[in-house]
Image (cartoon, coloured by chain):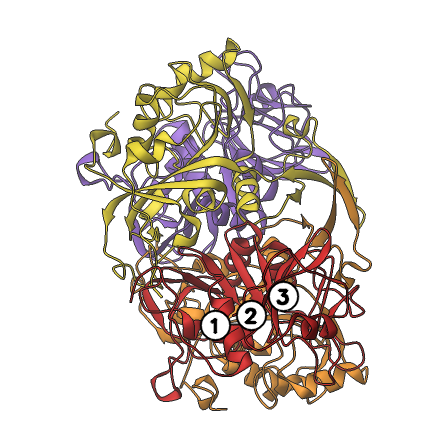
Chain colours: A purple, B red, C yellow, D orange
Amino acid sequence: MSADKIVPLKPADPRGRMVARAAREIAPGMVVNLGIGLPTQVVDHLGPDYPVCLHTENGMAGVGPTLPHELADRNLIDAGGAYVSPIPGSSYFDSATSFALVRSGRLDLTMLGAFEVAENGDLANWKIPGRFSPGAGGAIELAQKARRVVVMTTHCDRKGNPKLKRRCTLPLTAAGAVTRIFTDLAVIDVTPAGFTLRECAQGVSVAEVTEATGAPLRLPEGDIPTF
Amino acid sequence: MSADKIVPLKPADPRGRMVARAAREIAPGMVVNLGIGLPTQVVDHLGPDYPVCLHTENGMAGVGPTLPHELADRNLIDAGGAYVSPIPGSSYFDSATSFALVRSGRLDLTMLGAFEVAENGDLANWKIPGRFSPGAGGAIELAQKARRVVVMTTHCDRKGNPKLKRRCTLPLTAAGAVTRIFTDLAVIDVTPAGFTLRECAQGVSVAEVTEATGAPLRLPEGDIPTF
Amino acid sequence: MKLSDKTTSMAEAVAAIPDGATVMVGGFGVPGTPFALLAELARQDKRDLTLIKNDANETGTGVDLLIASGRVRRLITTHIGLNANAIAAMNEGRIEVEFCAQGILAERVRAGGAGLPAVLTDIGMQTELSAGKQIVQVEGRCLMVETALRADVALIHADRADPFGNLAYRATARNFNPPMAMAATTVIAEAEVLLPLGGLAPDEVETPGVFVDHLCPMAEITEEYGVVRR
Amino acid sequence: MKLSDKTTSMAEAVAAIPDGATVMVGGFGVPGTPFALLAELARQDKRDLTLIKNDANETGTGVDLLIASGRVRRLITTHIGLNANAIAAMNEGRIEVEFCAQGILAERVRAGGAGLPAVLTDIGMQTELSAGKQIVQVEGRCLMVETALRADVALIHADRADPFGNLAYRATARNFNPPMAMAATTVIAEAEVLLPLGGLAPDEVETPGVFVDHLCPMAEITEEYGVVRR
């Protein structure tokens, strides 16, 4: 396997293709924080020779593969509670140092989940008043301070309502933070002019993406590539 | 040697007696920072079984005896540049942690040198405008934040002028910080009413101390002990 | 010169904590949570506590022993999503919960331990976490004042320790333990392994014993410290 | 996943530093001063520098190679008493010197590395170090704003390192190195011993390689690093 290539998995399902496509966003040498949930699955697409340093906010750089319970170290988890492993060159540090890294610009990229993303890059992913308010954890600093913030989410919620909107209605995690969104339907950039379609998922039409997006979707000239 | 006794050295010279007397200010279990110069000599009066933790602001707790050059570790100095040694339980840390300890109240006592001490506890020991201005180093935080600040100094300067004054004329290190002064002539407390004589050096009269002090000196009732 | 011995039994160290105390507790999930000290706090029936902790552990374990039994008045935290008791207590108004951004909680605690009254930050400026925060303008920027947090007591979990209270940690069991071990009037550390004085090399110490008041050797590593099977 | 290799020659790492750069330099006295990187900086004749360093080393060594030859415009420091050249240059107005209280210098650098724009403190409030400082009132207390310090480049001395830039230090050679290794756009570390990746245990790392841009193995430990005979 080439050191500079993402493992070319070809998942059959739309979510799997979304994860595989998002993995290609990680350039060699980056320091990356993968949010809990879908973003964590990006790990499966990073081969053993790919030069990347994964950060977890509970205090580790160089996060290695997840371990089954029988091989787990009781003192070594990621921020989602998964038992992880070290790789050569990993380091452990306290919570103050962990967020110093985030706030001071050493985190190249974070991939986060979302309840809502607005066309101005606003992100809401931590609170649904009256229904879900467990606290923001590290999400606010990740979203506000990573050098690049991308979102990975299903295009619509379980009821079929668009998650990409003109404005967020839920409490914000960070304002104007998101630059790119990976969904099961498309890759969409947040630009000064609003949402811009970059790629469509296999078998998904531009019209379907436009229909499922809760804000105007700009189409660049020329063909829209497929992922 | 008893674990709770300071080594009973009996120096013949007045400075030596001052240092020996000051050493008795250190209670068992204290964390103590000894300023550069005379205060450092207090170490010679702390026996191997005396429970005390010496701190040096360049990043060590549990400072052990000074070593001759041929036994020195090139990476292990105190803030005065002397080559020191560890003792069982010593620890090393960075400059941020070192002053965190000072500012957060974990330093029980500091003994500092002085150019001037005022009867309100003001201390000047870092700058003589036009003549000596190398910077304050760690003196300001030690003087402002140690739980107890005592001064060890010759009673007068080289020209015979009193160092204990009504008010400091030199730039302050800290205001109202000093609670006790050890000199070659006396032990003097800083009280709300000003300087109060507590002890006289062997062979020194109360009149001599009063004469050498640049501010009113209160005398408590009863005999003044000798050290 | 020698360093003093601060070893204390958990029962004795915890006995000195008064009702109404503010207690910082290390840990992020299971790693670094001082379960033994927390169990002792519950056993001694301490009440009306204010807790400062990253999370609320899971139902039935750690600080939930205190929350579920009504011993906690107030909780300063970042995320309590794994503890349904804590969420319910908050929603029903039985405990008051103050949420911080996680790194800001760490910095507020660190500031407390570093003798800094406050830090200035723009974190959460455009979110509801900024509600009620004092704003100051510095060099043309609007910044929020995040005041230092100190506690009456910090409960710390260490991997190795010596009798002077020098501490070393394991892997992601560090988390909030090092900053909290500097930020309380009384710091009580439990340690899995108690080494003799000199057993921790000076370069290996992560929390200098100067910050620690009581060092409590652990009798056993109970099941709560183990790998969680979900 | 593997971690990238950041080993660079000193000549190459230093070549990227422009004239006019702000450079943080670790060290307190001899221990922790990156003499080899400083010699390379002088050899490449970098000019118009702003240095941030605890002290000015001694005459003829360390940063004095830069100060005595007129390469330094401005120095932010705590104490320069052991360097008569630096004192003279200051008195004659050839370099501008800003003095900080030592722990406040450490905190300003740490704030820079922690992405905090400023900290609030009462240190030096009643001294001339408070001159010109912004005062804010928080919860009834008057506090000084101490703004964060960041640099274009930090020059760091480590004892051991691996190719990813993970660093470990020795004894009192830590001092300003750990906070400075977090507070610059480009962090260049020299290391006495370069271990292979995995040669430093994750628990042993003091500065995570994430903060380090260039790791320069040292060819030799020159006399300047040795015990000073006075």
Q: Is residue A1 visible?
A: no
Please tell me how crowded label 1 is: few (under 14), some (14-19), or many (20+) other residues with Cα within 10 Å: many
Asked if the residue under mark 1 is in contact with the one under mark 2, i.e. CB atoms within 8 Å, the reply is: no
Asked if the residue under mark 1 is in contact with the one under mark 3, i.e. CB atoms within 8 Å, the reply is: no
Q: Chain of mark 3?
A: B
Q: Residue at x 49, y 35 (%)?
A: C152
Q: Are callouts 2 and 1 both on one chain? A: yes
Q: Position of residue D38 (x, y in %)?
A: 56, 81
Q: Position of residue A154 (x, y in %)?
A: 48, 25
Instruction: Answer with mark 2 or mark 3, whichever residue precedes in sequence.
Output: 2
* Near-viewer residue (D171 or B223): B223
- What amino acid is labelled 3 in the image? Ala
Q: Is residue A7 visible?
A: yes
- What amino acid is labelled 2 in the image? Gly
Q: CA distance from mark 3 to mark 1?
A: 23 Å
Q: CA distance from mark 2 to mark 3?
A: 8 Å
User: The N terminus of chain B lies in which quarter of the figure?
Assistant: bottom left
The label nearer to you, 2 versus 1, is 1
Residue that label 3 marks = B139
Residue that label 2 marks = B35
Q: Chain of mark 1?
A: B
Q: SS class of the residue under badge 3?
A: helix
* Near-viewer residue (D131 or A47): D131
In the picture, the disc for residue B20 is 1
Q: Viewed as shown, does residue D69 lie left or right of C67? A: right
Place residue B208 in its image quadrant. bottom right
Q: Residue at x 50, y 79 (%)?
A: B16
Asked if the residue under mark 3 is in contact with the one under mark 2, i.e. CB atoms within 8 Å, the reply is: yes
Q: Chain of mark 2?
A: B
Q: CA distance from mark 2 to mark 1?
A: 15 Å
Q: Residue at x 70, y 54 (%)?
A: D146
Q: SS class of the residue under badge 1?
A: helix
